[in-house]
Amino acid sequence: MNNLNVLLNLLASGNPQQVIQSNPQFNAVLNQAKQSGSIKNYVMQYAKQNNIDIQPMLDILAKRGFKF
């Protein structure tokens, strides 16, 4: 699972603790996100640097009530 998937799973999950427990690499990703200022900033930067279109995922999350 790559860093972007970890963060998207965290954003989509109703239970962040489950994401943390299911992926031991989460703390490293969380530290990188903290250095970026926020998880949102980190996800956006990561996606841009890796030429990943995350708009479809953002649309799905928005439909589920998440605000960015």
Image (spheres, rainbow, N blue to C red):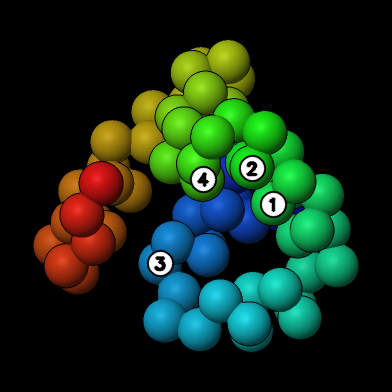
The local secondary structure at tag 1 comes to helix
**Residue topped by disc 3:** 12
Residue underneath mark 4: 39
Residue at 50% in and 41% down: 38
Which element is circle 4 on?
Answer: helix
* Earlier residue among tags 4 and 1: 1
The residue type indicated by label 1 comes to Leu
Q: Residues within 10 Å of mark 1 (few under 14, many from 20)?
A: some
Query: Looking at the image, which is closer to me, 37 or 2?
Result: 37
**Residue 27 spot, x, y in % from top left:** 79, 58
Q: Looking at the picture, how far across and down is residue 36, in whole percent?
A: 59, 30
Mark 4 in CB contact with mark 1 (< 8 angstroms) = yes
Distance between mark 1 and mark 2 Cα atoms:
6 Å
Separation of residues labelled 4 and 2 (CA atoms): 7 Å
Callout 3, which amino acid?
Ala
Hey, what amino acid is under mark 2?
Lys
Residue where numbered disc 2 is placed: 34
Q: Is residue 2 visible?
A: no
Task: Judge depth for marks 3 and 4 and give the one in front.
Answer: 4
Using residue 61 as the reference point, say whether residue 12 is left or right of it.
right
Mark 3 → mark 2, Cα distance in angstroms: 18 Å
Residue at 56% across, 53% down: 7
Image x and y of residue 9, in percent: 52, 63
Q: Is residue 50 left or right of residue 32?
A: left
Question: Disc 4 vs disc 2: Cβ atoms closer than 8 Å?
Answer: no
Q: Nearer the viewer, mark 3 or mark 2?
A: 2
In this picture, residue 10 sits left or right of residue 23? left
In three-dimensional space, the C-alpha distance between marks 4 and 1, rounded to whole angstroms, equals 8 Å
Q: Position of residue 56 (x, y in %)?
A: 27, 42
Identify the residue under disc 1. Answer: 30
